[in-house]
Image (spheres, rainbow, N blue to C red):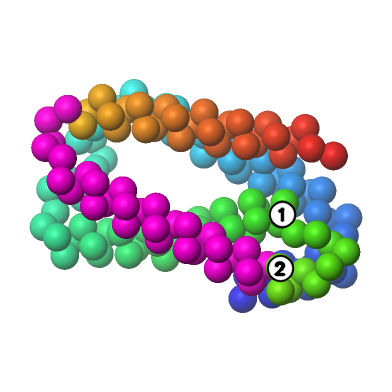
Amino acid sequence: MAAAGLAAVLTANPGLFTLIRWLGAGFLAWLGIRALAGARTAGDGAGDRSASLPGSGAFQTGLINMLHPGQVVFYTSVLPQFIDPARDTASQAVVLGAVFVGIVLVWFATYAALLSRLPIWGLVGTARQLSRLTGIALLGLAASLVLRR
């Protein structure tokens, strides 16, 4: 629904693309700054409810996070950067959405499978490094969106 609505809006008013791009860059920068700030406390257990949950509780937490409205905000702020307004925007948005969902599913399934096999000790440093890397990547993506014409 988000893809169809966004495609309709972009088709009706291509000038909104620039606004969406700037809003998307701002959102990515905010996420990057939060990830860098979170790197200081990553792995210390503060605010991490899922670390002490049994399997079904962790699954519920993941499902709630997946259905969070922030996912829609992320989708509608990032994926329009890759839509060519000269072609059918609705079909491009649907294909990009499907690719995005596929990438996310593969990434998190791999991430969960690998981390579930590692001992818990030593993950504090790894969590901090992953948060730093994520923050830097998000800030870089935001900068590339701002600098793009």
Does residue 104 appear to the left or right of 49 in the view shown?
right
Residue 109 placed where, x, y %? 32, 57
Residue 31 in the image: x percent, y percent?
52, 39
Instruction: Specify the label residue 72 is tagged with.
Output: none
Instruction: Say if mark 1 contacts mark 2, CB within 8 Å.
Output: yes
Q: Dot 2 corresponds to which residue? A: 92
Q: What kind of element bears circle 1? A: helix
Q: Is residue 24 magenta?
A: no
Q: Residue at x 80, y 59 (%)?
A: 84
In this view, the residue in front, 119 or 131, is 119
Which is nearer the eye, 7 or 45? 7
Amino acid type at image mark 2: Gln
Magenta stretch: residue 110 in it? Answer: yes
Q: Which quarter of the rendering shows the C terminus?
A: top right
Snapshot quadrant of residue 128: top left
On the image, numbered disc 1 is attached to which residue?
82
Residue at (71% x, 68% y) in the render = 92
Residue 118, percent from left and from top: 15, 40
What residue span does the magenta drawing correspond to? Answer: 93-122
Where residue 67 sits, quadrant-wise, is bottom left
* Position of residue 86 measured from the top left corner of the image (x, y, whole percent): 88, 64
Front in this rendered view, residue 50 or 79: 79
Say whether disc 1 or disc 2 marks the residue closer to the N-terminus.
Answer: 1
Q: Main secondary structure of the magenta part?
A: helix
